[in-house]
Image (cartoon, rainbow, N blue to C red):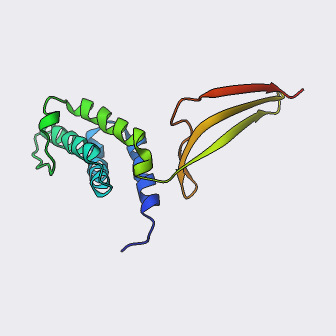
Amino acid sequence: MNTNREDDAYTLLIDKFFKGGFDYKNIEDYKKISAMAKAKGQDKAHALAECLIKKLEEENGKTYEADADLADYADLTASDAFDRVYSEVVYHLENYITRHEGKVVFYNHDKNLVVSSRMVKKTYSSDRLISLMMKKLKSMTLLNTA
C-alpha cells in the first residue's frame, strides 16, 4: 500500500539508524537503509550498506548474499563499514529526504542573552526533526539585550 509518505518513512528510518548505532540487533534497519539507498540510486551507500550487512552476518555465523559488488570494500570490518554508511547518509541526506534551511535564534530570558546562528542546517520532513546541527555552525553572534 502506497501512502505517498515515503519522505516520512525515510526520515523515521534514518532517525532510527542514527540513534541505533552499530549493533547486530539493528540488522533489519541496515537492510532497510540498503534498500533505501538502492531505491534512491545511491550506489556507493548501497554497496557500503550491503558490505555492512554481509560482514555482520558473517561475524554472527550466518551467510548473506549481497546484491552489490563488494570488491572495493573487502578489507573493511563491519564497524568500518557502519562508519562509512553513516557518513554517506549524513553527507548526502538531501538525496533521501527533503532538507530545509533556516535561521535559529535562541533566547535566554534569565540572562537577557540572544544567540543567533547563521546557516544552521535543519533537517526534517513533515515536522519531524532529525538533526539541528548537521553541519558546523558557520558563525555565532551574541547580542546583549539588556
Q: Is residue 108 left or right of residue 94?
A: right
Residue at 45%, 59% in the rendered image = 7
Task: Reply above or below: 6 against 82.
Answer: below
Q: How many numbered marks are there?
A: 0
Q: Nearer the viewer, residue 124 or 119?
A: 119
Find residue 79 and report its horizontal and vertical position in percent: 26, 31
Residue furthest right in the image: 146
Residue at 19%, 39% in the rendered image = 56
Task: Reply above or below: 113 against 88.
Answer: above
Find residue 106 and report its horizontal and vertical position in percent: 72, 35
- The answer to whether one can see residue 98 in this image is yes
Task: Reply above or below: 37 against 79.
Answer: below
Quadrant showing the N terminus: bottom left
Q: Is residue 62 left or right of residue 111?
A: left
Residue at 71%, 33% in the rendered image = 116
Find residue 38 and report its horizontal and vertical position in percent: 27, 54
Q: Nearer the viewer, residue 113 or 73?
A: 73
Answer with the quarter of the image where residue 59 lies.
top left
- The answer to whether one can see residue 15 in this image is no
Q: Is residue 22 left or right of residue 121?
A: left
Residue at 65%, 34% in the rendered image = 118
Quadrant showing the C terminus: top right
Answer with the quarter of the image where residue 51 lies.
top left
